Image (cartoon, coloured by chain):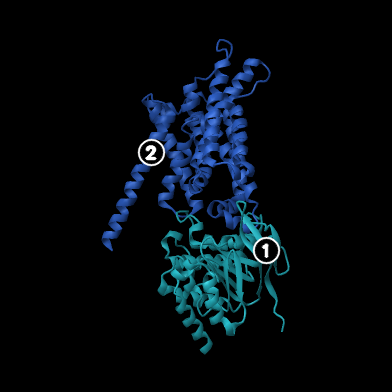
Chain colours: A blue, B cyan
Amino acid sequence: MDVFELLQFPFVQRMLLAAFFASIACGIIGTYVVVKRIVFISGGIAHTTFGGIGFAYYLQQLGVLYIEPLFGALIFALISAFIIGLPYIRNRLREDSTIGILWVVGMALGLLFLNQVDRSKIVVQDPVSILFGNVLLIKIQDLYLMLGLIIAILTITVLLYKDLQILTFDEEFARISGIRVDLLYLVLMILIALTTVVLIKVVGVILVIAMLTIPAAISNLFTHNLKNMMILAIIIGIIISFFGSMISLIYNLPPGATIVITLAFLFLLSLILKNLRFAIYKDIN
Amino acid sequence: MGKNIAIELNNITASYDNEIVIENISCDIFDGDFFGIIGPNGGGKSTLLKIILGLLTPVKGIVRIYGKSPKIGRKYIGYVPQYSEYDKQYPITVWDVVLMGRRSIRGLHPIYSSKDKNETIEALKKVNMLDLKKRHISELSGGQRQRVFIARALVSHPKILLLDEPTASIDRDLQINFYKLLSQLNETVTIVLVTHDIGVISSYVNRVACLNHYMFTHDDEKMISKEMLEATYSCPVDLIAHGIPHRVLDEHKKKKKS
């Protein structure tokens, strides 16, 4: 089957649209994550979403409330963003310990909740596809939620762009300039939480870190301007996630993992190219 | 002729991590001063800076910046941080670093105005860095980078320029140029600089205080060399070992001649 035939299928269109949304979110927020060196904070937030997905299924099982698994993920991501971003916790506990605890509690809760769900009554997504993503399972409702999140992310970042730049560059200076640093840091955590939720459908809980980190890291090899870094990261994200999705369909590979490996390969290639260029440049001089 | 008091420190005691770091510090810094605070590492210099900037509240005592509390008065201060306190890999150009100095004036408004941009040009001109405005901060020498951060501090038109260890990343030879720049700026702003490097107390500084838990201020300019010597001895030994005491004397004598 060739690419153009594939594009006729609604599920492929949904998959590409999801990848497109994911690339926008990870290009913008991933840039902040990379420059602020908070990749593992994002990892912590991302992994708690597994708990949220399990929680949503568990509520369905109890028959109390029907919530979409992705919405459950959003709730858990926001809770963990608040916990990590709270000044009280930030100033008193070691950050990496907090991250570690949230990370494993999220995963464990997810497993416990899923364990309680009777699969003969409720259709549960395979845990492996929750963890590693399955773009084939994207529903129209998921896309609406993702679109809403993207709009929220874009609006907040455009309004707070200059303050987020100062915060991520020089926190002390941010404080002196009259920025309410604790509040803005919390906002950044919430932005990461929103982004995480956009990403989990595409690459899965575990591979979210890859989408957040690698496009921005590649982009940073070629530009020293924060705005350009975001734009380039978005473009890289779109190209690679489209390319990876297509490869995964044609060769019947897991899409999330294929996208991640393609990204990692591009990162390596970019690193080599950049150093080559640098070496040649030095030679000429 | 009464001089305006720029920074008033009145009987300040402050602790950091439950340990008293500075005790009973009183000092007035006047408008137009070029004020040097020297002291060893761990002597309380950064604590004092945090107090002046309103980032730390003292246990006891009053701080006033042009008569206002630090949290309000810090808008009069342009702060130049230590070299180590920001991320050199951060993707940001000289231009964007200086422009962010306008945040204190622009507030939450999402876009910098053309006035902000003009001010940025002016500030870069003042430190002679306009040509390099498109450079990434990692592509600058220590001295150039320091001048960029001075421009960032100047761009909000502060009345006081507060510098933390400004010469730590600059070669000895270039330090003279750096002090020339500061003394030019001193024509319009009050300068307070903090350092552990006694060599910094060059002929440009007009007042000196020695900070190590307590602070000694040396106000009488005529007595400065004798007083300085005493002050140096009342400061801990490692300070003497780092700097060369007689060099300090030399430079102050030069000043008297001029």
Per the rendering, the mark at residue A264 is 2
Residue B112 visible somewhere in the drawing: no
Residue appearing at x 48%, y 58% in the figure:
B84
Task: Give B48 or B32, whichever is nearer the viewer.
Answer: B48
Q: Say which element carries label 2.
A: helix
Residue appearing at x 64%, y 23% in the figure:
A67
Q: Say which element carries label 1.
A: strand
Pinpoint the chain carrying mark 1: B
The reply to whether the C-beta atoms of the residues labelled 1 and 2 are less than 8 Å apart is: no
In the image, residue A119 above or below residue B156: above
Q: Quadrant of the N terminus of chain B?
A: bottom right
Task: Give B49 or A20, whichever is nearer the viewer.
Answer: B49
Whether labels 1 and 2 belong to a single chain: the reply is: no
Residue B11, image x and y in percent?
69, 66
Which amino acid does the dot numbered 1 rest on?
Ile
Q: In the image, B68: left or right of A1?
A: right
Residue named by callout 1: B12
Which amino acid does the dot numbered 2 rest on?
Ala
Q: In the image, B194: left or right of B24?
A: left
Pinpoint the chain carrying mark 2: A
Residue B241, image x and y in percent?
44, 69
Q: Quadrant of residue A190?
A: top right
Q: In the image, A9: left or right of A147?
A: left
Residue B215 visible somewhere in the drawing: yes
Per the rendering, the mark at residue B121 is none
Residue appearing at x 32%, y 48% in the figure:
A273
Task: Give A8 or A23, whichever is nearer the viewer.
Answer: A23
Residue appearing at x 41%, y 72% in the figure:
B172
Q: Nearer the viewer, mark 1 or mark 2?
A: 1
Residue extending furthest bottom? Answer: B257
